[in-house]
Image (cartoon, helix red, strand yellow):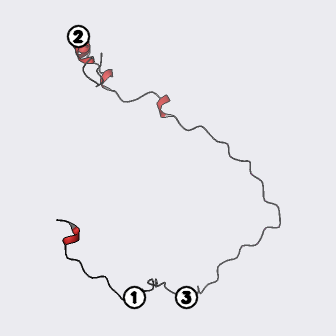
Amino acid sequence: MPRLLLPRLPMPTLLLPVLPPPMLLLPVLPMPRLPLPVLPIPMFPLPVLPKPRLIAPFLPMSMPRLRSTCCQGANSEAAAEASAWYVAIATTSIAHICS
């Protein structure tokens, strides 16, 4: 059904009231009872420290892995069996296969 045939509310002729934005209620804090200490201005020159050098980030890939992966197993029987079917599966699978 076209929108022109649907009933519509008449347009208001009076301007709608514009409300002011709400005011945030901020708490009024009392003055501190004890004065805060004022540090004296040093009369001697402060030491000038050298600029820090940029150090290369730590590269964890350069360290050897301490945990064992599937290719580092001690089961030579499974490794021998895997080498037999590796050629058939390697061409059809995207998974990492131990050889």
Q: Quadrant of residue 78?
A: top left
Residue 97: where, in percent of width, then height? Answer: 28, 21
Is residue 52 in the magenta section? yes
- Mark 2 or 1, closer to the camera: 1
Q: Which sits earlier in the primary sequence, circle 3 or circle 1?
A: 1
Residue 27: where, in percent of width, then height? Answer: 49, 85
Assess whether mark 1 and mark 3 are in contact (beta carbons under 8 angstroms): no
In this view of the protein, can residue 84 be seen by the observer? yes
In this rendering, would 92 be left or right of 49? left
The span picked out in magenta is 39-53
Q: Which residue does the numbered mark 3 point to in the structure image?
A: 30
19 w.r.t. 4: above or below: below
Which type of secondary structure does the marked residue at label 3 adopt? loop
Q: Which residue does the numbered mark 2 point to in the structure image?
A: 84
* Badge 2 amino acid: Ala
Q: Where residue 17 is drawn, which disc sits there?
A: 1
